[in-house]
Amino acid sequence: MTNPSGNSLFHKAFISAMILLTAWLFSSCTLLPTPEPLPPTATPTQTETPTPTIDWFPDTPTPTFLPPATATPVPTREGLLGGITELLVEDAFSDPGLWLTPQNQSGNVAFGVQNLSLAVARPSALLISMSQHTLPEDFYLEITLQTSLCEAEDQIGIIFWEQSASDFYRLLVNCAGQYRLELVQGGSNFVIQDWETASQMQRAAPATNRLALWVYNGTLQFFINDAFQFEAGIAQDQSGDLGVFARTISGSTMTVRFSDLKIYQVELN
């Protein structure tokens, strides 16, 4: 038979032993400190390469506007006919006494069938033929130019108001279709209108062009085939002789012919 009091004592002793063991184990353990939170790791900032700032609307300086030029009406050939009055000269190039016909190593000038032919026979050579015609202060002149042999830079022209071999005006055209106006004074050359490309001019050779000069009160206007080319101021109260010339520049030979010359008086109110 089991002894109840003995069992009770045994249980009490067991429970006491367990309490003591638990206390000993708790007291012998070293409690770990609660870990503090680590500081946040700084994220390295990437240094970006600077890029240029695009100015989509850049400032621009305020332009200075010039006042509009007063347009000078450019008369057409037809409009000028009102100022063209008396026919002073009509030369069909049939009178050998009216033009000089030099012949030398540079070439020769000769009369053809109602034309005056200038045949240059060597490079960088000049042929001139002066006439017995005197141009007044105000005049309108027309002459036909035919080129049958020439290179682009070869020059053909009209000498007007010649007072001496070193004082005159000359109007030049070349076979590339350009024109130029010069004043020769005291042997010095002055450019009034530098080379410009002509409009409505037949170029090279063979070619036929009608040249026209309108001069009035110190103003010159130049036409080719009835098309206005330019206007320039020249001297007033001048007069002098008329001549023509041909000159090789890029070619070694050239042949040109002048025909159908007419000179009129110009009178405007």
Image: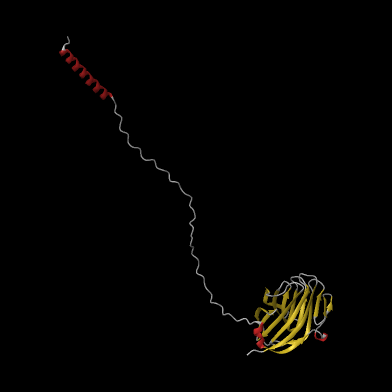
Classify the position of the C terminus by image quarter. bottom right
162 relative to 103 in the view: left or right: left
Q: Position of residue 3 (x, y in %)?
A: 16, 11
Seen as rendered, the residue at the extreme front is: 1
Q: Residue furthest top?
A: 1
Picture coordinates of residue 30, whole percent (x, y): 29, 26
Determine the residue positioned at 76% across, 83% down: 260
Residue 157 seen in the current view: yes
Work out whether 55 lies above or below 227.
Answer: above
Residue 171: x and y, percent? 71, 79
| Quarter of the rendering containing residue 104 | bottom right
Q: Is residue 218 visible?
A: no
Image-quadrant location for residue 28? top left
Single out the residue that lies furthest toward the right.
104
On screen, residue 123 versus residue 178, left or right, reads right
Which is nearer the eye, 168 or 196?
196
Q: Is residue 151 left or right of residue 55?
A: right
Q: Nearer the viewer, residue 256 or 60?
A: 256
- Which image quarter holds the N terminus? top left
**How is the structure coloured here?**
secondary structure
Question: Looking at the picture, how far across and down is residue 147, in whole percent?
Answer: 77, 75
**Residue 35, image quadrant:** top left
- Residue name at image x 68 percent, y 84 percent: 215
